[in-house]
Amino acid sequence: MKTRILVVEDDAAFGMMILTWLKKNGYEVALASRYEQAKKEISSKPFSLILTDLRLPDGDGILLMTWVRETIKSMVPIIVMTGYAEVQTAVSAMKLGAFDYLKKPINPSVLEEKIAAALASTEEETAEAFIPSRKQWVKGSSPAMMKLYKHVELVAPTKFSVLILGESGTGKEYIARMIHDLSNNSSGPFVPVDCGSLSKELAPSELFGHLKGSFTSAIADKKGVFEQAKGGTVFLDEVGNLPYEVQMQLLRALQEQKVRPVGSVSDINVDVRIIAATNENLENAIEEGRFRQDLFHRINEFAIEVPPLRDRLEDFEELTAFFIRQANEELGKNVKGITESALERMKAQRWNGNMRELRNVVRRCVLFADGESIDLDDLPVFIPLARKVSSDDFDDWALRPENEKEQIEAALRKARGNKTVAAKLLQIDRKTLYNKMHLYGIEL
């Protein structure tokens, strides 16, 4: 099925130009020229993306975005198009939930890049939605995991802030949810925060909330993450990606258990448990001046390290069987298992993407399997571990630490300089890519 995009634009000529371009690029497109017309379109059929002008004859893009989020309860990505390209206007729109914004006149290559990034974000959310709950998860019984679960059971009932360490894809959020479920805060909400998406402009509103009228287009009060999680747990995912300016604001909130919404003159008391996670060495980030030492000590009252998949091969067969069952349910297949030869081939790989990569590979194998079992012929072409990095090596390969610079350069070549696409190839977010490019002296 084609990707369906709604364009909301009152300038007929410009709207038709965007519509024609999108159709030529293989998208199914609907065009609305007014706010009320756009609402009818959205109510009648689902869309993968909405491109909306900021100013409309009977409303504006921000009103439409608020209606989509609060009335339809949809998280469809929304890109705001504006001829009024002030930074504050764009920031205000993003504070209220816009994925991104576009300045008019629109450059087709920029439009293509932003559409790709928005659609990729929904694919990632869909993939995450298939990650099972704690009750459905297969835990494994390797010594490494037994040690981890012992630490989880030890720290969960305490009030300690926990720092979860581990490579990308190891299941850090699953461990955070387990700690929450076993804690005294289990009856409260568990609110995850993607720290990589918090710019210094957006962070205060997202974390601490804002009052109506506190900035342009703040049309309603908004509760921040800390207030939403009151009595529960805030999970700061990839905390190393937080902008340095935001870290001081966060430290104050953690130390005082108080937050002040944007535009307010008074504080709100919040009682939350903090669990943070990272896939980088924060002590190195402190030495490089990218992370505050006082914040590190505040979130690192108890550290838990999640082992990579290659260090828990005793669990491999059990994990593979679990993902086969999950893929069967998702894809309507009836694959019963995996042959010994195929299992040994898979176990011999490095699995830099860990559990996430294994799940994706198993789903692919289940889809292509003709018989009752996954065999060697159903496996993807794995990249030899000693092979030199080339620009063709990224289909099933996450960024690995031992040759990061070479991989980043190869990914940028393959993406033809498109950093959003390169970050997706490397399975990292854009901010992490920019940080690593700066670290290695790669031209931005």
Image (cartoon, rainbow, N blue to C red):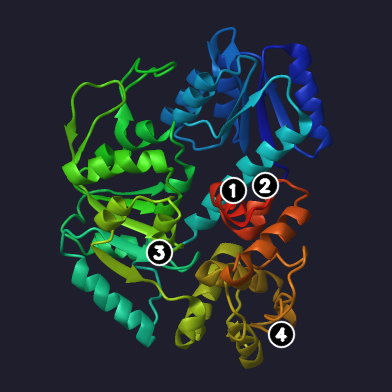
> Is 335 situated left or right of 216 in this image?
right
Q: Amino acid at mark 2?
A: Lys
Q: Secondary structure at mark 2?
A: helix
Badge 1: residue crowd in 10 Å (few <14, some 14–19, many ≥20): some
Q: Amino acid at mark 4?
A: Leu
| Element under disc 4 | helix
- The answer to whether 327 appears left or right of 22 in the picture is left
Mark 2 or 3, nearer chain start = 3
Q: Which residue is mark 3?
A: 172
Residue at image mark 1: 434
- Disc 4 target residue: 376
Q: Nearer the viewer, residue 300 or 426?
A: 300
Q: Badge 2: few (under 14), some or many (20 or more) residues near its Cα, within 10 Å?
A: many
Per the rendering, the mark at residue 419 is 2
User: Left or right: where does residue 207 sit relative to residue 9?
Assistant: left
Camera-nearest label, 3 or 4: 3
- For marks 3 and 4, give the CA distance: 31 Å
* SS assignment at label 1: helix
Going by the numbered disc 1, the residue's amino acid type is Tyr
- Residue 95 lies, in percent from the top left, at 45, 29
**Front position among marks 2 and 3:** 2
Mark 1 and mark 4 lie on one chain; the one further toward the N terminus is 4
Residue at image point 28% right, 61% down: 300
